[in-house]
Image (cartoon, rainbow, N blue to C red):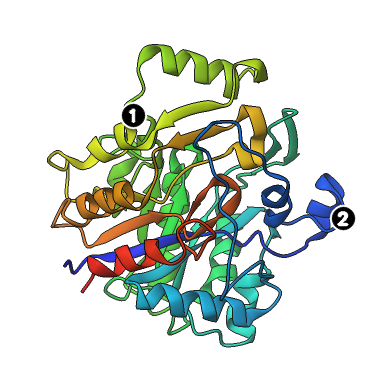
Amino acid sequence: MSNKKIIAYYLPQFHEIKENNEWWGPGFTEWTALKKAKTYFKNQEIKKPVEPLGYYSLDNSKVMEQQYELASKSGVEAFCIWTYWFGEGETILQKPLENILKDSVKVKYCIGWANHSWFNKTKGILLKEQKYLGEKDYQDFFYYALPHFKNECYLKDNNRPVVTIFDPQKIPDLNVFIDCWQELAKKNGFDGVYFIGDFTKTDDQHAEKLNACLDSRVMYKNRNFLQRVVEKLVRKHRLSFLGPIKYDYKKMIIPLWNRTPSTNKEIPIIFSGWDTTIRHGKLGVYYDNFNMDTFEENVRAEMSFNNKQEYVFLKSWNEWAEGNIVEPDSINGVEALKILSKYVK
């Protein structure tokens, strides 16, 4: 049992929006790819949602309450909800966040800035560009987030709202962004912001500006040279005849945390499977040998890693089209949730 707090990445892509209708066809949500998914390998199985959640729509704010009730009973402290700010007030998939405030949804949460452009990766087409427009725009972004920070359900670390940034080194004026938010947080009654950076190694130069960091790319760390070359040809150069890529979860994931943490800032990651063939077909990556035994090995290692860091990230709660989920599914039922509950006080 551990006192660590599990923060689960949460995807809000389960409701219809006009942009997805234009780009992918009428009625598109995350479920669209899942319903069309096919297998490519002998042992590959596609997880499908089952009751009590099923094929939900996040238009209904009660769904998130149901999700969090399941999560909190299983030891998940909070959802880290992917939040999209492209600059100049341009957002997307914001309805679930808005519903939290509008409908007083009972869920502990924080925001994760999904700091990247949107692409059609199969065709290599830019759909929506992530822009960096300087301090005034960062101020606008802060005040967009402020009502959430003030929400009693928002996750805080010693009166500092917790905020995750995806790939912070891509922000050309990262110091300006962080200093701006730290100053505005203090002006609005907080003791600053607790920044967590993903895609961040503890020895990266920008890590010194962050309170903690994790690097979800670590799931690929144990590839050999040939695997790296083939994966680059498939994922970067889109040579689909070489794909999909298959790795072994037990070999790739289990050894990751059998070491001493590099600093107190390092946050470990629980990986709840991986199968992006659902979204990308032959350009995807599939992790074989993910089952409840290997998942529990992963959980056990994370929960004992870096005892001076109180957070553990879970990737993810509901990334159905990338095969990393702990919601009740057609293969494992609620077993993943039961495993999490065994390791959290």
Which residue matches tag 2?
26
From the top left corner, tell me how far across and down residue 125 is, in percent: 75, 31
Q: Is residue 30 visible?
A: yes
Residue 188, horizontal then vertical, whole percent: 44, 77
Q: Which residue sits at x=16%, y=55%?
A: 304
Mark 1 / mark 2, whichever is N-terminal: 2
- Relative horizontal placement of residue 37, taking residue 257 as reference (left or right): right
Residue of label 1 = 221
Q: Position of residue 11 (x, y in %)?
A: 57, 59
Q: CA distance from mark 1 to mark 2?
A: 38 Å
- In the image as oriented, which residue stretches furthest toward the front? 42
Q: Could you tell me which residue is drawn at 58 percent across and 26 percent down?
A: 244
Label 2: few (<14), some (14–19) or many (≥20) C-alpha neighbours in 10 Å: few
Q: Is residue 194 left or right of residue 135?
A: left
Amino acid at the residue labelled 1:
Lys
Vertical placement of residue 93 versus 124, above or below = below
